[in-house]
Amino acid sequence: MKQEDNRTRPKRSIRTKLFSALTVMIVITLALLWLMQVVLFDIIYTNVRVSEIEATARHIRLFSDQPNFFRTVSESTSQNDICADVIRADGSIAYEVENTSTCLLHSLTVSERSELVAYAGETSLFKVNYDTVTDSYSLEAFSGSVLTDASNILYIESITHNSETLYLILDATVSPVGTVKKASASFLIILSGVLIGVAVLLANFLSKSIAEPICEISRRAKALTTGSYTAVESHSTELDELNASLLAASHDLEKVEHMRRELIANLSHDLRTPLTLIGGYTEMMRDLPSEITEENLDTVLCEIRRLTSLVNDMMDIAMLESGKTVPKPEIFDLTKEVGEAVGRYGRLTESEGYHFSFSADENATVYADKTMILQVLTNLLNNAMTYTGDDASVSVSQTLNDAFVRIEVTDTGEGISPDALPMIWERYYKVDAAHKRAAKGTGLGLSIVRQVITAHSGRYGVRSTVGKGSTFWFELPLYSPGLTDEG
Ligand code: ADP
């Protein structure tokens, strides 16, 4: 279901994605700023102003019986832009402080002030509702509601100073919210414009530094298969890594392509030669019955065997690589099996002048696929026979080290050059395909050795000195009880 969604989702360029992401981010930021401005600003502003009045009143109350009472009233109100009147019950003024011009307090008459006295002792905070038409005001108990328009808040409290009852009236203007809101609204509009501009520039810059190199890399990647990929200049580590991986892939692909071409050439050569020979000899024997000799039939048979062995090797490799052939391990005496195989080779090739020898320190038991391991040995023995020197000798030895048993097959041939050594384990690789003896092989023998030994968690390798000969070896884990349980 999810896969289907991915398939149907329209693809967009990195530039568009970056721009959309940045736009979303900016929209969220602006929305939060607008929210702060529209909803929270009034609440916060009103609360701050109210707590300023209350704190000022509390502070003044502490000094009501002190000689510096009036100085305290003056100082603490001026700090918070609050106007203050200290009046007597008859409305006359005992002390007054005018810190802002927007205060209502100072425009009141004596009788109006004496009316205010009546409010002292009830609710302390009042909102002044001023009616501009009748030029009159009324007081409304302030319940902590949010003030959105310019308003005055009065704080009225009776206090005792020098045994006289006085009335402290504080007047704070809660006015600038609207103005500040308007100012910040235009600020927000400018900010929105600037942020959108920045988003466009950023999206362009990011897409230039990310998307463009990627586009260029993908354009050049089309040349990957021909191995002619060239790195794109980039300023980021990730793109450098991508470049490096693609360069490596390009080299590998070039190698694979080269091997593929060689493979086709080798295969067609390996198949065509025996087929031509078989065809030619058979035709000749059909046309000239006198040519049906044992020697000619042997040649045909030999070529058929060669073809069969090539096809068998190809099948083995294909099966091993596809995982269709998995080792069927059993416990067996490797020393005995190797000794017998070497003995058979010696007897079979004695008449041709070959000399096979085998030495072993002590008997080694392994838990492995016997047929596969003997095929590995056969491949190594065949190679040693093919490539050994004029003395036609091949020696096989077995040694034990730690938990492994090692079999070494040594010949006295031409050896292999260090350049070719790492390649000989590759499929269809032949050191010198033109070499008469090498042309006999299929180029698959060592590849099968590699596959089989790897499938047995073993190790393999070769030591070779040009002009002196080569030693091919493989190691298998020694059998120990408990191994079979895992295997
Ligand atoms: P092949 O069937 O051609 O022998 P292999 O995979 O067994 O294929 O070997 C690959 C190549 O390695 C051979 O073509 C040969 O050039 C080289 N090689 C293998 N064994 C020996 C050896 N004992 N001495 C020298 N060269 C060898």
Image (cartoon, grey):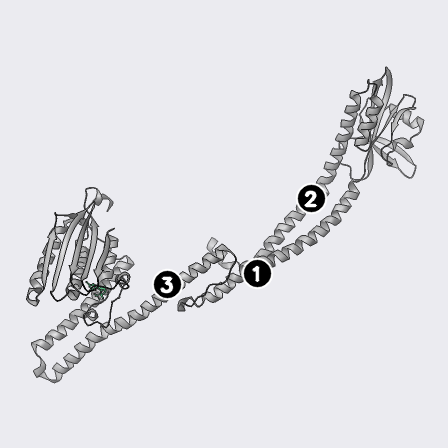
Q: Amino acid at mark 3?
A: Asp
Residue linked to disc 2: 35
Residue mark closest to the camera, 2 vs 3: 3
Q: CA distance from mark 3 to mark 1?
A: 30 Å
**Residue found at the far top of this picture:** 163
Q: Quadrant of residue 284?
A: bottom left
First in residue order: circle 3 vs circle 1: 1
Query: Does dot 2 land on a helix, a strand or a loop?
Result: helix
Which of marks 2 and 1 precedes in the sequence? 2
Q: How many residues crowd around disc 1 within 10 Å: few (fewer than 14), some, or many (20 or more)?
A: some
Q: Amino acid at mark 1?
A: Lys
Pinpoint residue 382: horizontal percent, then vertical percent: 16, 63
Q: In this figure, what is the number of numbered marks?
A: 3
Q: Are marks 1 and 2 in contact (CB under 8 Å)?
A: no
Q: Nearer the viewer, residue 37 or 131?
A: 37
Query: Does the rendering let one see residue 374?
Result: no
Residues at marks 2 and 3, CA–CA distance in whole angstroms:
58 Å
Q: Are marks 2 and 3 in contact (CB under 8 Å)?
A: no
CA separation in Å, label 1 and label 2: 35 Å
**Residue topped by disc 1:** 208
Is the CB atom of the residue marked by disc 2 within 8 angstroms of ligand 1's nearest atom?
no
Q: Classify mark 2: residues with Cα within 10 Å, few (<14), some (14-19) or many (20+).
A: few
Rendered residue at 55%/59% (across/down): 209
Between disc 2 and disc 3, whose residue precedes? 2
Where's ligand 1: which quadrant?
bottom left
The residue indicated by pointer 3 is 252
Q: Foreground mark, 1 or 2?
A: 1
Is residue 471 visible to the viewer in this orientation of the structure? yes
Q: Give coordinates of residue 197: x percent, y percent.
A: 66, 56
Left or right of residue 427, residue 353 in this image? left
